Image: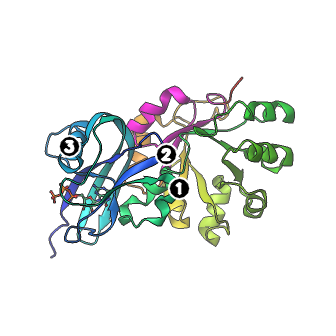
Amino acid sequence: MSSPLPEIVVVAGIIPDGHDRLCLSRRPEHKHQGGLWEFPGGKVEPGEALDHALARELHEELGLDAVRSRPFLTVRHRYPDLRVTLHFREVTAFTGEPHGREGQPVEWVPRTELSARAFPEANRPVAVALQLPPEWVIPPEDLDEATVIAGLGRLDAARQGVYLRGWSTHPGVTAACRERGLRFWVRNDAALATREGAFGLHLNGPALARAAEEGRPAFDGLLSVACHDATQIAQAMAVGADMATLSPVRATPTHPDASPLGWQDFQELVAGNPLVFYALGGVGPEDLATAREHGAYGVAGIRGLWPGV
Ligand SMILES: Nc1nc2c([nH]c(=O)n2[C@@H]2O[C@H](COP(=O)(O)OP(=O)(O)OP(=O)(O)O)[C@@H](O)[C@H]2O)c(=O)[nH]1
């Protein structure tokens, strides 16, 4: 019988410079995943807190002192020779100018150029998350079109994306998203999403089940799916989804019959799946830190996120 794969826990820093660039370093050729670009970091020592481990690694490798960091995304990945749990943390305050103290190349890379760099396979969900807003706003469907368009005008395009749901088929609403530079997702219809220049296509439960039978819809942007349980998460992986909503975290008036997951079950369901998850159902921007602690990248919702409801 073969011996079990070695398992390591790693912490890595997403370090922005305030000019939309991130700090990357290149792994030495002789190391695991050698020659590829990485977010600087290294192994967590037994019993060590993640923020402490990150500060220690960044000091050792880059001469950079991380003053504050917060959870960004956790990824579990199985390489042929190694199992790794990677805790990516966003460094929100630091001192010092990073340089390769171990001789490794270190660069500030514009976010828009990240896709041109080769990263280890485990980093795929991070590459997706870095394109995504932390808040995913769903306009209410009981408003008139003019009110929805006015509400879209109050969103912050850097922080908020829009899932148009029932508004997907309203050209005035999609045009307003484009004019305001908002990343928007269209419901179920790949051809419509392509025509409208949507950032993403979102499949609801029945459309996800269909895609699981028929294959990934023909759409070049991000594929998002709605999940409520482990079966749908497995379907999401099978269709090659990039992101997923998982709901309901809490009880909501929109779906009064659904029983809430709570943060504990949410965390257990998302753990180990290489998808970017949004917590949906009774949550708002004030829950973002809790959502990240439980494995979500962002928060999604109607009432908790729409401006002016
Ligand atoms: N730091 C970092 N490691 C990553 C990333 N992506 C990824 O798959 N890894 C993997 O996580 C592991 C990091 O461990 P490491 O060996 O660099 O840790 P370390 O700095 O303590 O190295 P050492 O103690 O072996 O010198 C490697 O297997 C590496 O391939 C990433 O973005 N950043």
Marking on residue 59: 3
Q: Is residue 254 left or right of residue 159?
A: right
Mark 2 surroundings: few (<14), some (14-19) or many (≥20) residues within 10 A: few
Instruction: Compare residues 80 and 234 and report the one nearer the observer.
Output: 80
Is 284 magenta? The answer is yes
Q: Residue at x 37, y 44 (%)?
A: 15
Identity, as a three-letter code, of the amino acid under mark 1: Thr
Q: Quadrant of the C terminus?
A: top right
Vertical placement of 188 versus 63: above or below?
A: below
Which span is picked out in magenta?
276-305
Q: Residue at x 14, y 40 (%)?
A: 47
> In this figure, which residue is indicated by the disc labeled 2?
20
Q: Quadrant of the N terminus?
A: bottom left
Question: Does any portion of residue 301 appear in the rendered image?
Answer: yes
Q: Closer to the N terminus: mark 2 or mark 3?
A: 2
Q: Secondary structure at mark 3?
A: helix
> In this figure, which residue is indicated by the disc labeled 1?
112
Instruction: Compare residues 306 and 251 and report the one nearer the observer.
Output: 306
Residue furthest to the top: 308
Q: Position of residue 161 (x, y in %)?
A: 63, 42
Q: Residue at x 57, y 35 (%)?
A: 281
Mark 1 surroundings: few (<14), some (14-19) or many (≥20) residues within 10 A: few
**Colour option used:** rainbow
Q: Closer to the N terminus: mark 3 or mark 1?
A: 3
Is 48 magenta? The answer is no
Identity, as a three-letter code, of the amino acid under mark 2: Asp
Badge 1 vs badge 2, beta-carbon distance below 8 Å:
yes
Q: Position of residue 189 (x, y in %)?
A: 74, 59
- Per the model, the C-alpha gap separating discs 1 and 2 is 9 Å
Identity, as a three-letter code, of the amino acid under mark 3: His
